[in-house]
Image (cartoon, rainbow, N blue to C red):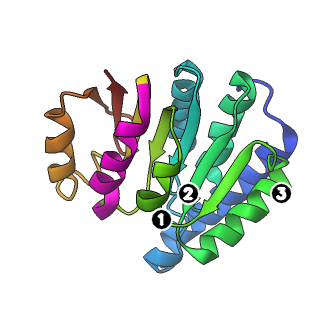
Amino acid sequence: MFHDIFDPIKERMNYLEFIDKNDRINGTPKLHRLRQIPPETGKFIALMLSASPDGVATEIGTSAGYSSMWLALACIETKRKLITFEIQEEKVKMARETFSKAGIENIVELVHGDARHLISRYTGISFCFLDCDKEYYLDCYEAVIPKMIRGGILIADNVISHAAMLKPFLDCVYNDQRVDAVLVPLKNGELVCRKR
């Protein structure tokens, strides 16, 4: 899947990687930064989506659509669509541009709104990548897990880099009898949960 990346997707990834790198060094305010995952994490979440059972693939926190492109590659491979949620108007506009330029508008459904309230519309979720503002992780988790099928996979980003802030979330997950969970020490830390 990764040896033959479609040219428009690769071009857009390169473009967003350039912007993200500059955002991190030029003092761009946090709210306006892309704050996207590194490529290694992109490959990891795409592989995990590919390995997840058939069902609905979701993402909470689209930003400019960088991680969505990695997930879209897995969706192409597994013949499904990605539903991605973004609350900020500015990021929604950037994501729409990304999906158009990458040629994946027919694979990715962008939902503008708060996933905590909108995820209830979906059932049969087999995969979720959680990468929104950290204070909402627990609420998002509690909204998604009841909608997940057995064997479904939820991945939460930044659990090492934001360990102190995410401690209540992590304590909850590690004690949740509905899932098996493990911390993968890749880059900023990925919490992988599998629905029992």
Task: Give the Cα distance between marks 3 and 1.
Answer: 23 Å
**N-terminal-most mark, 2 or 3:** 2
Residue type highlighted by circle 3: Ser
Q: Total marks drawn?
A: 3
Q: Is residue 42 above or below residue 34?
A: above
Label 3 or label 1, whichever comes before in sequence order: 3
Left or right side of 14 for 42: left
Camera-side residue of 130 and 36: 130
Dots 2, 1 in contact, CB < 8 A? yes
| Residue 134, image quadrant | bottom left
**Sequence order check: which comes first, mark 2 or mark 1?**
2
Q: Residue at x 52, y 50 (%)?
A: 121
Disc 2 and disc 1: Cα gap in Å? 7 Å
**Residue at the location (44% across, 75% down)?**
30
Q: Is residue 141 left or right of residue 74?
A: left
Amino acid of disc 2: Phe
Residue at x-position 70% and y-position 26%: 2
SS majority, magenta: helix
Q: Specify whether 37 is left or right of 191.
A: right
Query: What residue span does the magenta drawing correspond to?
Result: 135-149
**Circle 2 or circle 3, nearest the eye:** 2
| Real-space CA distance between mark 2 and mark 3, rounded to the nearest whole angstrom | 17 Å
Give how far across and how far down residue 41 sits, in percent: 50, 38
What residue would you read off at disc 1? Answer: 114
What residue is disc 3 on?
100
